Every structure is written in structure tokens, then in C-alpha cells.
Amino acid sequence: MGVIARLSHVGFNVPREKFAQECEFWEKVVGLKAMHGQAGRNQFFAADPLRDHEFILFATDNPVTAFGEEEYILNHIAFDVPSFAEIDELAARVEAQGTTVDRQPDGSRRRARFISPAGIRFELNTPPYANPEGYEDRPRRA
């Protein structure tokens, strides 16, 4: 029986009027690399330079439900970030664009949550091993 090895990529519909702003946010603010796309139609991004893409934005003229609206099917997408310092740097860049960042602690991990210009909720996380001394002492869910 075949098994899934890993998530390949995620694609989001974005209102056409916010498409350019959303693309700029992910490339200039968050630092994903714009790989290829069709102008005004879609844009492919990658965090890993060895991959063709992991993240796609599609411009649409149809209504798009933003995070927090009752019909929204997606809760969030999370990216791993290697260190506490890099979480802080990325969060500061997002905040500098006027976006609110929620920096809730999570045991030995560091986390930053925010909503992109098009209304997509994202999370930046350090892996638990970024602070291995505190990992075993973190609260556990029952």
C-alpha cells in the first residue's frame, strides 16, 4: 500500500484586488522565494530552494472567505523556523507592515501567528528541539 511521504504544497485563492499585495507580502516581508507564475493569475513560492514550490497563490474574481468568517474551512498553515531569533525577526518584519502578530508561548517552542493581507492565518514555529533543555518540562495535553 502506498504511503504519503510529506505535504507537497498548499494553494490559496486570493481576491484579485489583493493578489499583488499578497504576493509582495510573502516575498518581501516573509522571505519566501517567488519561483514562477502567470502574471495576475498565479504565483508559486518556495522556502526550500531545492523545491519547485511549496506555496501557491491563485487570483480569483470569486468571493473568498477570510479567516474568522463562519464558512472558513482552513484554520491555519504553519511554517517551521529554525531559531527563536529568526521567529522574532520574521515577526518584527510582519509587524512593521502593520500586521498584528500574536506571540503566544508554547512550552519550549516559540510561535508567532498572524493573518496575511488576503485573510489567510499563518503560524511560524520553532521545532521543539530548538530549546531541548525545556522540551521535557513543557506541559503535556491529557
Image (cartoon, rainbow, N blue to C red):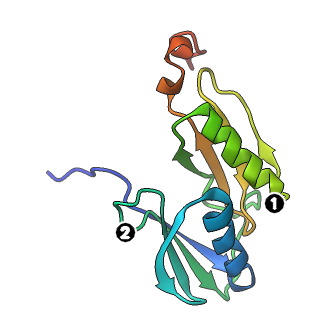
Residue visible at 64% across and 73% down?
23
Q: Relative to residue 31, is residue 63 drawn left or right? A: right
Q: Position of residue 76 (x, y in %)?
A: 61, 52
**Residue denoted by label 1:** 97
Q: Position of residue 127 (x, y in %)?
A: 50, 32
Q: Quadrant of residue 22?
A: bottom right
Q: Quadrant of residue 134?
A: top right
The amino acid at mark 2 is Asp
Secondary element at image label 1: loop
The amino acid at mark 1 is Gln
N-terminal label among 2 and 1: 2
Please say if 10 is above or below 62: above
**Residue denoted by label 2:** 52
Q: Position of residue 53 (x, y in %)?
A: 42, 67
Q: Relative to residue 10, is residue 73 drawn left or right? A: right
Residue visible at 73% across and 32% down?
104
